[in-house]
Image (tube, grey):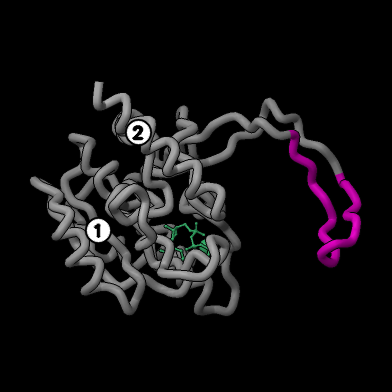
Amino acid sequence: MVPAAGRGERLGPGAPKALRDLGGAPLLVHAVRALARSRAVGLVVVAAPPQGVAEVLSLLDSHGLDGKDIRVVAGGATRQESVRLGLAAIPESTEIVLVHDAARPLVPVEVVDAVVAAVRAGAEAVVPAVPLADTVKRVRPVAAGEPEPVLDTPDRATLRAVQTPQGFRRETLAEVHAKALTEEAAGGSPVVTDDAGLVEYYGGRVVVVPGHEEAFKVTRPLDLVLAEAVLARRRASDGF
Ligand code: CTP
Ligand code: MG
């Protein structure tokens, strides 16, 4: 499933991020195509911006994605809610679910297949990830612009930057989302930024497989420049 209901505030003013253009097609269309390229993918559920379900349906239609079952549901106010709503549209007979950000339009199919393979091999939760280029420091956050005290520096060799698609046994993912919803209703809620984080929070085991530098997330304006460049390079090399 593809959570695509975010506004893309960090990308600046304009349409919802998933609907922004990248080389002639919306980010979402690239992301859905990237998933659909995998033979392991049969159904794609998109969680669209709540006001944009009809628009997303006709967009996907006009960009013709042959041979795959594509469904669109209204997303929610948070990514977690969007994933939960998308999951509800997936048949219970489905064994493996991938969750892939609309904001990662250029993920290579090899990454999708590697994630599926690891779930098929027995993992309940799988994330693709890459080593970090930058050294990372933990700080005590203070008001913007003020110097922040450094707490420590984790050993970079043990750190990974996590991408999508993240892969799960459907049952595992549905279970942790249901638990999180119950906790939310009780006034608490686990603070996580990805689906694997929920699995970890509830004591499940998550494993990492190699990601790819082209699976980066389009978050800020510079990322869109990079995505255009990667796409142009692919189109040029396809031309040969
Ligand atoms: N997402 C979603 N529903 C939300 C928020 C986010 O489906 N309520 C999706 C986004 O559409 C995106 C993915 O989750 O594909 C990753 O989120 P992010 O990169 O943070 O996108 P946005 O939330 O749109 O961007 P920003 O945080 O800058 O507003
Ligand atoms: Mg966001």
223 left or right, relative to 95: right
Considering only order in the chain, which callout, 2 or 1, is on the residue closer to the N terminus? 1
Q: Image quadrant for the C terminus?
A: top left
Q: In the structure shown, which secondary structural element does the residue marked by tag 2 occupy?
A: loop
Residue lying farthest to the top in this orientation? 240
At label 1, the amino acid type is Val
At label 2, the amino acid type is Pro
Q: In the structure shown, which secondary structural element does the residue marked by tag 1 occupy?
A: strand
| Residue marked by disc 2 | 108
99 left or right, relative to 202: left
User: From the viewer's perspective, is residue 174 above or below residue 208?
Assistant: below
| Residue marked by disc 1 | 45
Q: Image quadrant for the N terminus?
A: bottom left
Q: How much space separates mark 1 and mark 2, taking CA atoms?
A: 19 Å
Q: Which residues are the magenta region?
A: 135-151
**Frontmost residue, 196 versus 202:** 196
Q: Residue shown at 39%/35% (left/top)?
A: 123
> At which x and y percent is residue 85?
33, 68
Q: Is residue 173 visible?
A: yes
Q: Residue shown at 33%/45% (left/top)?
A: 169
> At which x and y percent is residue 214?
44, 35
